[in-house]
Image (cartoon, coloured by chain):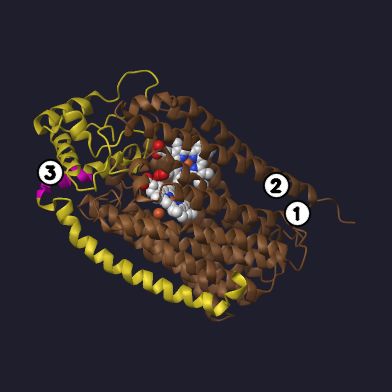
Chain colours: A yellow, B brown
Amino acid sequence: MTERITKSMAKNIYYGGGTFALMIFIALTFDTVHQIPKRSNQQNMTESVVAGKKLWEKNDCVGCHSIVGEGAYYAPELMNVFQRRGASDETAFKAYMQGWMAAQPLAIPNRRKMPQFHLTPTEVDNLSDFLIWTSKIDANDWPPTIEG
Amino acid sequence: MKYTSQSVAKPYFIFALILLAGEILFGLLMGIQYIWGDFLFPLIPFNVLRMVHTNLLIVLLLFGFMGATYYLIPEESENELWSPKLAMITFWVFVVAGVLTILGYLFVPYAQLTELTFNNLLPTMGREFLEQPLPTKVGIVLVVLSYLLNVSMTILKGRRTVITTVLLTGLLGLAVFFLFAFYVPDNLIMDKFFWWFTVHLWVEATWELILGAILAFVLIKVTGVDREHIDKWLYLIIAMTMVSGILGTGHHFFYMGAPEYWLWIGSISSAVEPLPFLLMVLFAFTMARDRKIKHDNEIALTWAKGNAVMGFLGAGVWGFFHTLAPVNMYTHGTQLTAAHGHLSFYGAYVMIIFTVISYAMPILRGRPHGNCAKAQKVELTSFWMMNIGMLGLTLALSAAGIVQIMDQRVGTDLIGFMESQESINGIYMVRAGFGLLVFTGLLTYFYSFFVKEPAKS
Ligand code: HEM
Ligand code: HEM
Ligand SMILES: [Fe+2]
């Protein structure tokens, strides 16, 4: 097969095909950037949600957890923890989060441990708001089940 | 060694190997903490072990690419390196920045590290693989720029070959796409979307050019096959890379908040992504078959062939397993992802570093015909230990991933993440066992450097 392909043909596919693919990619990037605010309900991205995201990064939560399927696989997926632990009720979820964050690390021998981050109650609320906002993103019906 | 300036490659190679030992050691520690959660906790929490592990990987590959470039560019352009001095300064700057960053991870709590390193000025930290403090990220940019300058100047004043052009294109792409690491929008989804511009477009586009170029260089040297022939293959490989890999980024946009059309575009384009890796296998084996010379450094060719095969398995086969949208719905973010991440990074990128080191290092040490037979035998043993270790580790993680998916995502009788993980503990022990084999293989590999040459007759 490769005998019939010459060096200059291969070179042309590289430059031509590469440029073509890149053009389409750039066009779709513009469209995606245009659509993400709607699909992620950017209008609901309050100051508290943004503060929550900053805390998520500052404490490197993604070093153990995944969120929207990306990150580490040591600890549970958190995109749908609002549904799983809060039954989609904001007050219940925020109360649960205050208790959960304060209780770390759990004293169960040999269980994988989550560190104590010493966050203030407001900071924990910010994280809850961030996770609630994340849970409502249109991710084409992912995750497939409540267990994440 | 044809040009004295090629010798700057040596410290880069040595340091890359030291970092690799660190990387695998931290992998082992993580493998143990996976099973016994109290191991090292709270001294080093999992996320810290993980950032050390993955960042060492990225930095060792950068050191390896740089060493390879500094070795092959003078020979290809038939010219001394533009500034060997700059290359050495860059080396030390990168070493110091790298070591300080790792020490920072290990000895300063991460939240405090963000404060100490001006993360509030331009928040970029706390994202997977891009955990580096701002000064480190800026340092990487400066190091890469000075390296690009050095390489470009050398190429400009010398002979231009397809290999140098492809390599330089790959390196430019590496630099450009790293810049997305500095763009962190407040919207998590927008953030993730552009995060992949660095991560995916590195490993599945620009780095593949670098990989192809280094592989082609080593193959020319150890098989003596005509350059025209090699060039055609190289163009064919990178053509397929570009055609599939750029739009293939879409395989990360299925279930993260991006529009539906990526389900189709990502699936179709990335389904073609195994092709360039398959071509690399054909390339390596065809060149080996048609070889014009029998180089005494046989192990270098073995690494080149192994590189192509393992890269195809890790990226091509394991990548294909989960790259179609309906399958990815169930596999997204599971141990199956980790299985693929391990075999692909190892097979494609760690092994190209082994390949070029195996060819170049003996020459840099004054052994133009390669190491002695005994040293090559030791190296071959380490080749098999590491390859079998990584394959075993990957198979174990794949099994873990399948159990995890059945437990959490299929049917009605579901169990939660922590419970499911506990039930997988046995498989994680197997994983750790194979990890130990990889580490022992690496030590064996190190030993091969110290095997005494027989006295010259
Ligand atoms: C040498 C080349 C490659 C390397 C180093 C590599 C590495 C990785 C890594 C580390 C991840 C995990 C990223 C994360 O943490 O979220 C990943 C994900 C993925 N890779 Fe690759 N990959 C390569 C090639 C490929 C190819 C050729 C394909 C397809 C045929 C592929 C398909 C995928 C898919 C679908 C995911 C997403 C998995 C998920 O949804 O969880 N990869 N890759
Ligand atoms: C002794 C061998 C090794 C062990 C036991 C090991 C263990 C681990 C563990 C436990 C994780 C974290 C998974 C999680 O987030 O839950 C990880 C991540 C990772 N390791 Fe290793 N590792 C080893 C060797 C390697 C090698 C040789 C490479 C590369 C060539 C590598 C590349 C990676 C990558 C890219 C990730 C991120 C994966 C992803 O996000 O999907 N590891 N490793
Ligand atoms: Fe990818």
Calculate the distance from the C-alpha at mark 1 to the C-alpha at mark 2: 10 Å
Q: Are marks 1 and 2 in contact (CB under 8 Å)?
A: yes
Observer-nearest of A110 and B396: B396
Dividing the image into 4 quarters, which one contains the N terminus of chain B?
A: bottom right
Give the residue displayed 55% in from the left and 76% down from the top: B154
SS at circle 1: loop
Q: Indicate the amino acid at tag 3.
A: Ser
Residue B454 on image: x %, y %: 84, 50
Sequence-first tag of 1 and 2: 1
Q: Which residue is mark 1?
A: B371
Disc assigned to residue B379: 2
SS at circle 3: helix
Q: Which residue is mark 3?
A: A48
Q: Dot 1 falls on which chain? A: B
Q: Residues within 10 Å of mark 1 (few under 14, many from 20)?
A: many
Observer-nearest of B412 and B313: B412
Q: Dot 2 falls on which chain? A: B
Q: Indicate the amino acid at tag 2.
A: Glu
Q: Are marks 2 and 3 on the same chain?
A: no
Q: Indicate the amino acid at tag 1.
A: Asn
Give the residue displayed 47% in from the left and 66% down from the top: B171
